[in-house]
Image: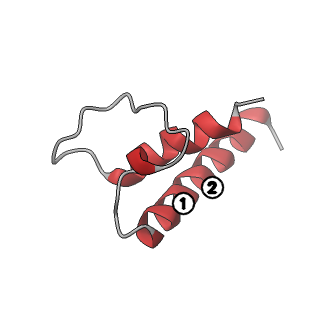
Amino acid sequence: MNTQREYGLLETALENAAKIICTMKCGLCPIREKNFSGCPYTCDEEIRPWKCWVVHLRQISTRP
């Protein structure tokens, strides 16, 4: 498998995981999660909470 394809598959998996977690949390933003260090998005009606979950999952996966 090539690297670009693997990256695409990982991105899809991350997005799907974020959507599942968001659904389990009743569509709430991860702002209340422990160690959430902020989101690059400005909250408005165009931003979906699962996008914030993607950011949060990336943040916690890169911590030592």
> Which label was assigned to residue 60?
none
Residues under numbered marks 1 and 2 in contact, where contact means CB atoms less than 8 Å apart: yes
- Compared with residue 40, is residue 54 higher up or lower down, i.e. above or below? below
For label 2, the SS is: helix
Q: Residue furthest right?
A: 1
Residue in the image at 37% along x and 28% along y? 40
Q: Quadrant of residue 38?
A: top left
- Compared with residue 62, is residue 25 higher up or lower down, i.e. above or below? below
Q: How is the image coloured?
A: secondary structure
Left or right of 21 in this view: 63: right
The quadrant of the image that shows the C terminus is top right
Residue 56 in percent (x, y) is at 52, 41
Q: Amino acid at mark 2?
A: Ala
Residue 3 in percent (x, y) is at 77, 34
The residue that disc 2 covers is 13
> Which label was assigned to residue 16?
1
- Compared with residue 7, is residue 53 higher up or lower down, i.e. above or below? below
The quadrant of the image that shows the N terminus is top right
For label 1, the SS is: helix
> Observer-nearest residue: 59 or 8?
59
Q: Amino acid at mark 1?
A: Asn
Q: Residue furthest left?
A: 45
Circle 1 crowding by C-alpha within 10 Å: few under 14, some 14–19, many from 20 = some
> Observer-nearest residue: 57 or 37?
37
Residue 42 in percent (x, y) is at 24, 32
Residue in the image at 50% along x and 38% along y? 36
Left or right of 50 in this view: 34: right
- How many marks are shown on the rendered structure? 2
Alpha carbon separation for disc pair 1 and 2: 5 Å
